[in-house]
Amino acid sequence: MRAVARYSLLAVALAIIAVTAVASAGANAALIGSKQEQQIGAQAAAQIESRYGLYTNPSWNRYVQAMGRRIAAQSPRHDIAWHFKILNTGDVNAVSLPGGYIYVFRGLLNFVGRDQGMLAGVIAHEVGHVSAHHQTKMMEREFWTNAALSLLTHGRTQQLASMFSNIYDLHFSRKDEYQADELGVKYASRAGYDPYGLARFLQKLEARYGNGPSGIASYLATHPSNSARVQRVRAYAAQYAR
């Protein structure tokens, strides 16, 4: 996902929720601990599910949940409960929230078809974000911004929290995306899936939708995608395929 020059609405919304969670835990609590992270994630998940709805096909949900649990078992994050669900939207995308809430989109399932490695690569990438604490680091960077504190004192917490339900406000840095790529390839490989699945997914995405902001796929709107990234991911795959 592309880095932005200034604070995104999502980052401010996360900061507001985090301020509330940490304040309730006491002044001496850690900035955002595992418990607070899961509380924030649960609030965000409820908003997203209310806004987009869930795809409730039993067989697809069993498939995604089994794959997700198998991949998450490779992560060092044993302090959280992982959740894997399908959003009922035709966009080709996936998203991870604080506390281990991972969503794939119904459109992503249609896009990858029978290629298990592609889906595993995308899910593992999102698991990588949570494993590397990218969401909590984002919140901590924004935690004490004047904007967040000002908005909090003006009673707009609920309003900004509701904006978090727009997943397209979520922007990780390019560095975080590359780290999630590497962790994702490692987790997918260790879980027994094709380590080249993520690279294959990115190549198929670019072939169909184009390379960069001119493409229409929502995944390209929220993730960086270019030939150099594909080569980097293939190099990770070659490393972990040994």
Image (cartoon, rainbow, N blue to C red):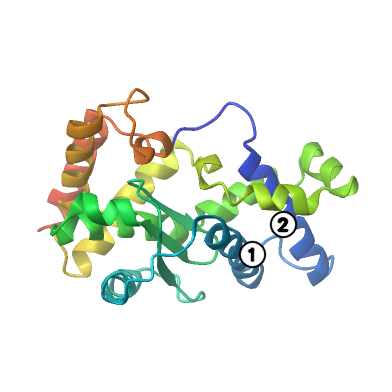
Looking at the image, tell me whether mark 2 or mark 1 is earlier in sequence order: 2
In the rendered image, is residue 12 in sight?
Answer: yes
Residue ID at (84%, 65%): 27
Quarter of the image for the N terminus: give it: top left
Quarter of the image for the C terminus: give it: bottom left
In the image, taking residue 126 as reference, residue 122 lies left or right, namely left
In the rendered image, is residue 183 in sight?
Answer: no
- Seen in the picture, residue 41 relative to 5 is either above or below; the reply is below
**Amino acid carrying mark 1 in the image:** Gln
In the image, taking residue 242 as reference, residue 191 lies left or right, namely right
**Amino acid carrying mark 2 in the image:** Ile
Residue ID at (12%, 57%): 241
- Image position, residue 7 (x, y; %): 64, 34
Secondary structure at badge 2 equals helix
Q: How many numbered discs, if any? A: 2
Q: Residues within 10 Å of mark 1 (few under 14, many from 20)?
A: some
- Seen in the picture, residue 204 relative to 71 is either above or below; the reply is above
Residue most toward the top?
214
In the image, taking residue 240 as reference, residue 140 lies left or right, namely right
CA–CA distance in space, label 2 to label 1: 9 Å
Residue occupied by mark 1: 43
In the image, taking residue 179 as reference, residue 2 lies left or right, namely right
- Image position, residue 148 (x, y; %): 78, 43
Residue occupied by mark 2: 17
- Image position, residue 8 (x, y; %): 62, 36
- Quarter of the image for residue 200 reads top left
- Quarter of the image for residue 65 reads bottom left
